[in-house]
Amino acid sequence: MNLSSFSAILLKSGHFILDLPINDKELETIVKALTLGGDSSLYEKLKLVKETRDAHPGGPYKKILRETYGMVI
């Protein structure tokens, strides 16, 4: 189990600020739950974070999200 902390998204607009210590498995569970219904905007943001983390395990996912999508993690 990856116990790294995930600090949720702070968008450029500053409308969404959240700091939660969750691991990759918990993030996956949240994204899967949101596919069943809920806030589509939140789903898209968290899905993007998950996909970026999956594509760059142990890598610079925070930098990629910040520079590519304007998200600060």
Image: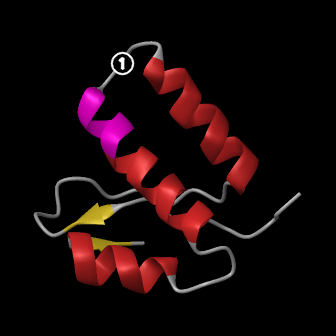
Viewport quadrant of the N terminus: bottom right
Vertical arrangement, residue 68 with respect to residue 31, above or below: below
Give yes or no for residue 2 being in the magenta stretch.
no
Residue plotted at (70% across, 54% down): 24
Q: Position of residue 14 (x, y in %)?
A: 17, 63
Residue plotted at (45% across, 22% down): 35
Q: Is residue 68 left or right of residue 35?
A: left
Tell me where residue 72 sits by quadrant: bottom left
Q: Which residues are magenta?
A: 40-44
Q: Is residue 6 left or right of residue 23?
A: left
Vertical arrangement, residue 65 with respect to residue 47, above or below: below
Q: Position of residue 12 (x, y in %)?
A: 15, 70
Tell me where residue 18 sits by quadrant: bottom left
Residue plotted at (39% across, 53% down): 48
Q: Which residue is mark 1?
A: 38
Badge 1 amino acid: Gly
Residue plotted at (57% across, 56% down): 20
Q: Residue furthest left?
A: 13
How packed mark 1 is, by other alpha carbons closer than 10 Å (few <14, some 14-19, many 20 or more), is few
